[in-house]
Image (cartoon, rainbow, N blue to C red):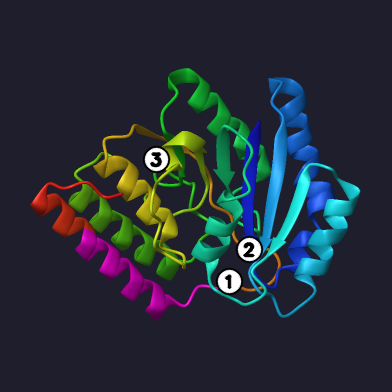
Amino acid sequence: MISIVIPLYNERENILTYREELFPEIDRIAATTGESFQYILVDDGSQDDTYSLLQNLARERTDVIALTNRKNKGMGAAIKHGLQHCEGDLIITMDSDLTFRPEDVRGLIDAYRRSHPACVSGSPYLERGLMEEVTFFRYLLSKTVNSLYRVLLGANITCVSPIFRLYEKNALDGMRIRSDNFEINAEILAKLILNGKSVVEIPVKLHTRRHGESKIDVKKEIKNHMRLLTNISKIRILKGNWG
């Protein structure tokens, strides 16, 4: 089984697209690959009716589990909550706004089946044109952050911060994940790399959000990433493990 974890905060408009854009595509992938899926949809204390809509989906589909944090704690907190309920041997994390499209899940699975790494990570930097929909400011910020991670980690990884990933569940078991915000994705990947786990990347296009607004607080996320980068530097210098 493959568990798909999606954190959500005030995402009613995007949830309304899942019946046409998320579930049918994953159902097609299941039919062609023989995989089974479960959805772990985690409301992060939304102020709209996100959780109510998720509960409706859970009543409609037996493969959907709807969870809530009740209070807004951040993307990382929602992902960590979701990970606790995953039954699959493999775990996929995705954005609630489907800026990485559901059809690209097949690419993650195919790459995993080829070499069985601990993580398959989607990267819009592997090929030209995969970030053409993104604003220049977001591109520049993302490029800068990911370049810093790549240098500090000493790994040939082009993209450390995005959420669109496939993990082996046993690679995450026992990992102490501290981040409660958007930098959780960078923390997990950094810990896998620094602990000697295999990570491969595949090219995936990053699309713009069609509904709702981005929840990223740029100043806050820069601060969080700098703290994480500092921790990585300490680990590299001290040659220690990062659990």
Q: Residue at x 41, y 62 (%)?
A: 183
Q: Secondary structure at mark 2?
A: loop
Q: Which residue type does callout 2 highlight? A: Arg
Query: What is the x, y in percent for residue 109?
Result: 57, 29
Name the residue tied to disc 1.
Answer: 214
Q: Nearer the viewer, mark 1 or mark 2?
A: 1
Instruction: Tell me whether circle 1 and circle 3 mark residues in contact (CB < 8 Å).
Output: no
134 sits to left or right of 152: right
Q: Nearer the viewer, residue 142 or 86?
A: 86
Residue 147 sits in quarter: bottom left
Q: Which residue type does callout 3 highlight? A: Leu
- Labelled disc at residue 199: none
Q: Secondary structure at mark 1?
A: loop
Q: Residues within 10 Å of mark 1 (few under 14, many from 20)?
A: few
Name the residue tied to disc 3.
Answer: 126
Q: Which residue type does callout 1 highlight? A: Ser
108 sits to left or right of 241: right
Q: Residue at x 49, y 26 (%)?
A: 111
Q: Is residue 186 above or below residue 9?
A: above
Query: What is the x, y in percent for residue 49?
Result: 80, 74
Query: What is the x, y in percent for residue 50?
Result: 76, 69
Residue 168 at least partly seen: no
Query: What is the x, y in percent for residue 51?
Result: 77, 67
Q: Earlier in the sequence, mark 1 or mark 3?
A: 3
| Region rendered in magenta | 215-231
> Whole-Å distance between the Cαs marked 1 and 3?
24 Å
Q: Earlier in the sequence, mark 1 or mark 2?
A: 2
Q: Is residue 133 above or below residue 158?
A: below
Name the quarter where the N terminus is drawn: top right
Name the residue tied to disc 2.
Answer: 209
Residue 218 at least partly seen: yes
Q: Nearer the viewer, residue 5 or 163?
A: 5
